Amino acid sequence: MNWPYASRDPHAREEIGNRIAVAARKQELVNYSKLVRGVTFTLPNVEGGRPFQIDVADWTDLHRAIIGDFLGYLSAETYSHAGIFISSIVVTKDDGTPGYGFTEFMREIGVLTS
């Protein structure tokens, strides 16, 4: 798969991965806002490569695409190493379920068929 964002920022990827791992070890869920709050992204294809943080009070479609890309990358990585989709514990504040992007990713790779 092509990862236009996650493949380009190993530091942000590691920070997000660590935050998910901490929640998983505690057998907790983590919402998207808590996951990315304070994470600095440095992506050559966003903001002219300047470091930025996601304003969790004002999500944009680009922000959702970036986070979805990072979560897809991390899930593909953990699935290949341990047989789990680690991003399944990242949920919305509203109803505590994984977001639309997670469901679409599962369909895309053939895990969900309906």
Image: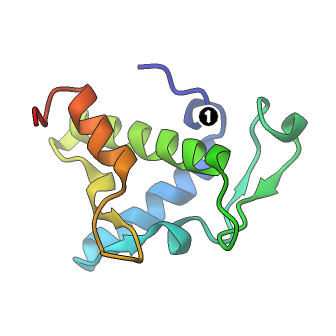
| Residue designated by label 1 | 5
Q: How crowded is mark 1: few (under 14 residues within 10 Å), some or many (20 or more)?
A: many
Figure check: 71 above or below 107:
below
Q: Where is residue 2 in the image (x, y as percent from the top left)?
A: 48, 20
* Residue at (18, 47) in percent of width and height: 84
* Residue at (56, 37) in percent of width and height: 6
**Residue 13 left/right relative to 47:** left
**Residue 13 left/right relative to 30:** right
Q: Can residue 58 be seen in this view?
A: yes
**Residue 37 left/right relative to 99:** right
Can you say which quadrant of the picture contains the C terminus? top left
Residue at the top extreme of this rendering: 1
The colour style of the image is rainbow
Figure check: 67 above or below 32:
above
* Residue at (43, 47) in percent of width and height: 71
Foreground residue among 73 and 110 = 110
* Residue at (61, 41) in percent of width and height: 10
Q: Position of residue 26 (x, y in %)?
A: 27, 80
**Residue 61 left/right relative to 100:** right
Q: Position of residue 38 (x, y in %)?
A: 69, 70
Q: Where on the picture, by quarter, is residue 23?
A: bottom left
Q: Can residue 11 be seen in this view?
A: no
Figure check: 8 above or below 16:
above
Which structural element holds mark 1? loop
- Mark 1 belongs to which amino acid? Tyr
Residue at the front extreme of this rendering: 114
